[in-house]
Image (tube, rainbow, N blue to C red):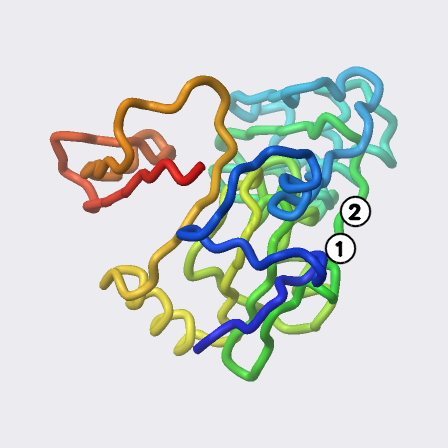
Amino acid sequence: MKFLGPFPGQNTASPRWGLGDMGPLDSLESLGQLFDPPISDPPLGPPPFVRGNSVFKGDISKSFVDQKAYELVKALTNLDSELCKSLVAFGALWLNGKIIFDPKQKLAPGNFRLNLPAYQPQIYYEINPERLVLKDKDMAVYHKESGPPSQGVPHDAFNNVLAAMERATKIIYRLPHRLDAATSGFLILAANRQAASRIGRSFQEGRIIKRYLALCQGPPPDWHTKTTMASIAKENQKYIVNPTGPGLPAKTIFTVIA
């Protein structure tokens, strides 16, 4: 498969920058050809909506067993009932490690985690159709902007590429890989289980290579190319670099290009 340019949103009068033929980045105009402005979150809401997100967690007390989910949110935050219902429907409440969306769901014994977004619950991100690079019966490729995550996060199940693609196309997609929120680039979405399996194997077998272009600050290192081998492991629900293993092997090649 080949993607023929220009990239969506790119100035067609500008050169197609390649990783091997890039000239000096000597102007803001040059940078504008490479990096789109990031999409930012909405403004901060009033307390308890604070930067960095507010987190409430603990065990569900006996007095709240069989109470409605939004009533727990109300007791924790002192917000009005309708806003508490919206927060649950927004995906901010997790019970026993699983997200719930029904504000009136009865609480069972166990533990909870309430992740308040820095902004009040609102859908502010939708895909840009011009950035949809490819779409067929098996897959779609979206040129993700910097800012939105690839999939839902604990405090927000709606403002991400996967959810926005499903809203726009009415297709339930699967993600065989992800890009970090701050990273822009091609994100592959599988339209069925078979395609997800094939694409996933391609990543596992090293037949798909990701190339990242990063703008760094400070003097360049004293090497031109450097290769790093490490293992990626999961620890306490987070992925970490585990140099001595065990974990999945990862190879990263750094090259100074300008």
**Residue 126, label in figure:** 1
Q: Position of residue 113 (x, y in %)?
A: 56, 29
Tell which of 254 and 1 is nearer to you: 254
**Residue 201 sits in which quadrant?**
bottom left
Q: Report the residue at 85% width, 32% height from top.
A: 81
**Residue 177, label in figure:** none
Secondary structure beneath label 2: loop
Mark 2 against mark 1, which lies toward the viewer?
1
Secondary structure beneath label 1: loop
Q: Position of residue 241 (x, y in %)?
A: 27, 31
**Residue 123, label in figure:** 2
- Vertical placement of 180 versus 216: above or below? below
Q: Position of residue 1 (x, y in %)?
A: 43, 78
Q: Residues within 10 Å of mark 2 (few under 14, many from 20)?
A: some
- Vertical placement of 215 versus 15: above or below? above
Q: Report the residue at 57% width, 59% height from top.
A: 16
User: In 3D space, how far apart are the residues under numbered discs 2 and 1 (Cα atoms)?
Assistant: 8 Å
Q: Report the residue at 50% width, 21% height from top.
A: 217
Q: Report the residue at 52% width, 59% height from top.
A: 187
Q: Are marks 2 and 1 in contact (CB under 8 Å)?
A: yes
- Vertical placement of 137 versus 10: above or below? below
Q: Position of residue 194 (x, y in %)?
A: 39, 78
